[in-house]
Amino acid sequence: MRALALRTVSLLTFATLDSISATPAARAEDGTDEQFGKVHFQTSCNEVAQRRFDRGMRYQHSFWYRPAKVIFEEALQADPECAIAYWGIAVSPLYNPHFPAPKEILTEGLAALQKARALGAKRQRERDYIDALLAFYSGDEATTFDQRAQAYPKATKAVAARYPDDDEAQIAYAITLNVTASPNDKTMPTSSRALPSWSRSSSDSRATPAWRITSSLRLSGDRRTRSRRC
């Protein structure tokens, strides 16, 4: 699994290191992060919390994980009943799902998701996202990273299947599949299947770094598959 992790994170390494070593002004006004692309994750939260949640997702997709967590917390402050904000708080500390999360991160993330469940999201889609992430965080000290990593794709697959037009669900599924893909599989068919049927160009206003990387994985997998068939 360790060798697989080193192989699959090559595209993410520099962006991840940069994101956790520098922190932009997380409290800047909404709508001032055009360079991060456009993301809209529909929630049942109030208008202010919705804007902040979208902003948190832009940061999350651009690998600014620590500021993303702060912004998700601001969304919760704007709407204390915004249960999905706890999901954002739980997903942001993972940084890179290819590597085991420290014990304190697992404890904090599980606590956030438990709060989300106790609060009760108003929409089924939000509850599904929360439950899927719980598949990773659930367990005890004896639960290994491999066990968490194997459980998570099954949960994200169910969400992606239930919401085929939900870009966020498709990306989450693609990332989790990439974590568990066999290191001997050079075609990356699983990642290709999970990605949306289109690719984002760098000129697309919605193309956050996460969009570009997952699109690159899809195109690379498609090219390798075709080359093997020739």
Image: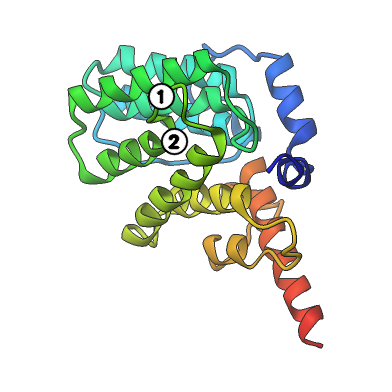
**Residue at position x 39%, y 60% from top?**
165
**SS for tag 2?**
helix
Q: Position of residue 156 (x, y in %)?
A: 42, 49
Q: Quadrant of the C terminus?
A: bottom right
**Residue at position x 43%, y 24% from top?**
90
| Amino acid type, mark 1 | Asp
Q: Which quadrant of the structure image shows residue 183? A: bottom right
Q: CA distance from mark 2 to mark 1?
A: 11 Å
Question: For residue 136, which numbered disc appears in the image?
Answer: 2
Q: Position of residue 129 (x, y in %)?
A: 34, 41
Q: Is residue 152 left or right of residue 100?
A: left
Q: Which quadrant of the structure image shows residue 118? A: top left
Q: Position of residue 121 (x, y in %)?
A: 21, 32
**Residue at position x 56%, y 17% from top?**
67
* 103, above or below 161, in the image: above
Residue 104 seen in the figure: yes
Q: Quadrant of the N terminus?
A: top right
Please tell me how crowded label 2 is: few (under 14), some (14-19), or many (20+) other residues with Cα within 10 Å: many
Residue extending furthest toward the front: 142
Q: How many marks?
A: 2
Q: Nearer the viewer, residue 220 or 30?
A: 220
**Residue at position x 70%, y 52% from top?**
203
| Amino acid type, mark 2 | Phe
Mark toward the viewer: 2 or 1: 1
Q: Position of residue 132 (x, y in %)?
A: 36, 42
* Residue where numbered disc 1 is placed: 140
